[in-house]
Amino acid sequence: MKRIVGLLIVLCVLLVVACQKYVDKTATADPRLTNHYCNDPNAVNYNWGFPGKPDNTVCFYPNGEFVGKYVYYDTVYQLDLSKSYSRIDTLYIYSSSYTALQVLGFCSAGDTMHLTAGKTLVATVDTTIITGQQFCRAVDTVSGTITKNLADTLPLLHVYFTVVSDTGTTFHIGYAQKL
């Protein structure tokens, strides 16, 4: 009986201690944390290098990885994946926000293609109608992506477009090298 009473007293004491609210200690700067990391969730490198000191000057954003002048090596395939032709163009990629991109150079008429770039460095053609975005002619639409791999040693963009037209569907697969 004395054991049960003793265990109940110990249990009551543990319950009282366990129910007390925890008081967090005041944070102190750790002198070992010297590296700087990006603390902006819109950036590609958000929290890279954490823990450390937050420093948004080290951030880079999706648009900055795409903007520039490129030479574009394009191979066009038919719907049955037979090669149709190859061409070389100059592309200009501009930015109006952290994610919005405009691409010039695909169409001889100077039409602008609009894309949205994500933190994974995939820029997707903005869909304005069911089959994509109007392309070079009023009867053409384009859909697809432009991607960048940070591990590439050359500043390359990989292009994968599908063009639906009154004359059929073609696939544009190529790469663009920054000039």
Image: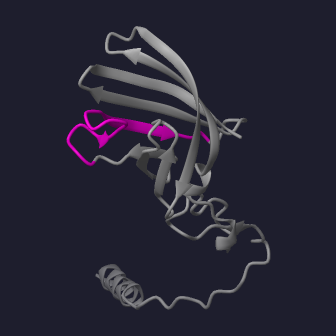
The quarter in which the N terminus is drawn is bottom left
Using the image, determine if residue 175 lies above or below residue 169: below
Q: Residue sitting at 74 percent across and 78 percent down?
A: 30
Q: Which residues are magenta?
A: 128-149
Towards the viewer: 126 or 62:
126
Tell me where residue 54 sits by quadrant.
Answer: bottom right
The quarter in which the C terminus is drawn is top right
Query: Is-magenta flag for residue 147?
Result: yes
Q: Residue sitting at 67 percent across and 61 percent down?
A: 49
Image colouring: one colour
Towards the viewer: 130 or 31:
130
Q: Residue sitting at 64 percent across and 72 percent down?
A: 56
Towards the viewer: 11 or 147:
147
**Can the viewer see residue 59?**
yes
Residue 50: x percent and y percent? 64, 64
Residue 80: x percent and y percent? 32, 10
Query: Is-magenta flag for residue 53?
Result: no
Tell me where residue 135 sits by quadrant.
Answer: top left
Using the image, determine if residue 68 lies above or below residue 43: above
Residue 154: x percent and y percent? 71, 35
Residue 71: x percent and y percent? 64, 34
Using the image, determine if residue 173 lies above or below residue 56: above
**Can the viewer see residue 62?**
no
